[in-house]
Image: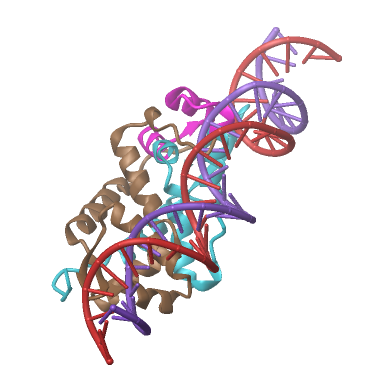
Chain colours: A brown, B cyan, C purple, D red
DNA sequence: TTTATTAATCGTATTATTGCAATATAACAT
DNA sequence: ATGTTATATTGCAATAATACGATTAATAAA
């Protein structure tokens, strides 16, 4: 039904899924990579860089803002976006915890 | 329009987005965690464990199989699923590459 | 004040995803 | 052969996501 049954899963699973979903789009990956490369950037840079419409870029920025991985500060008429290092580190840790070492255990295939 | 403009992005970005999207659901995270914990499992285990319908679990398993992160081997009437360690390691590496260290750079916020 | 610039939001069309009942398939058991 | 068990697939309904034009809001520049 397009609607995830979050009540069937624990908090960690739901939290991780939300994080992954927020990152799971090439435009949002490109946005994050561009911000990291340039240290910061404004919406219009991304419109030119990625070739998507301004409304679309703005929507992707909002999704990244929602999970807190980026933050923006007003700078004249534009808004300067940069990485929220705390959340970035948390995301990194959470993913590392998920990707535990699975070598040397018995399996069927 | 519900359709991602993959041609706007590079291969690495699209590949990473596909990986993240495949993982971006609490049921699929739970499935992977269960497989890791038990070393392997069959579909019916997951149906009981997660509480979702058999058709739904089967669908999630297929998505994980599509990106290759799990593989199944026929074992009588059931199919034994386990982690594909090679792909798991690749996913881990790809995510680690993305989550580069971003500390100590200038930013606007 | 008027105009330009920049970004957010709204509305809408289109496609994707989620979930499940029903059915199909395939191997084993009797 | 027939029934049982386990999984995959199909078809469908409901919701979510993607993209963009149009509009709005807010600041800067003239």
- Residue B58 on image: x %, y %: 57, 35
- Magenta stretch: includes residue B47: yes
Q: Position of residue B32 (x, y in %)?
A: 41, 40
Which residue is at a point 32% across and 32% down the rendered structure image?
A: A10
Give the camera-side residue of B49 and A6: A6
Report the predominant secondary structure element of the magenta stretch: helix
Please state if A82 lies on the left or on the right of B60 as rendered.
left
Report how many numbered discs are placed on residues in the image. 0
Residue A99 vertical placement versus B95 (above, below): above
The x and y percentages for residue A62 are 34, 58
- The answer, for residue A86, to whether it is visible in the render is yes
Task: For the N terminus of chain A, give its image quadrant.
Answer: top right
Quarter location, residue B19: bottom left
Residue drawn where x is 40% and y is 28% of the image? A8
- Stretch in magenta: B32-56
Q: Does residue B67 appear anywhere in the picture?
A: no
Q: Which residue is drawn at the image coordinates 34% and 38% (left, top)?
A: A13
In the picture as drawn, the residue positioned furthest to the left comes out as B104
In this rendered view, identify the residue nearer to me: B56 or A44: A44
- Residue A82: give x, y in percent of width and height: 23, 68
Q: What's the residue at 40%, 41% (across, down)?
A: B29
Q: Which of A47 and A78 is in front in this view?
A: A78
């Amino acid at each position: 039904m397009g609607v995830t049954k979050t009540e069937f899963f624990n908090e960690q699973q739901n939290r991780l899924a939300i994080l992954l979903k927020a990152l799971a789009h090439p435009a949002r990956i490109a946005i994050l990579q561009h911000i990291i490369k340039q240290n910061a950037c404004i919406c219009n840079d991304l419109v030119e860089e990625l070739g998507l419409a301004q409304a679309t870029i703005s929507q992707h920025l909002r999704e990244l803002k929602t999970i807190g991985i980026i933050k923006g500060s007003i700078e004249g008429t534009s808004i300067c976006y940069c990485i929220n290092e705390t959340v970035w580190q948390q995301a990194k840790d959470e993913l590392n915890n998920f990707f535990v070492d699975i070598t040397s255990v018995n399996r069927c295939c």
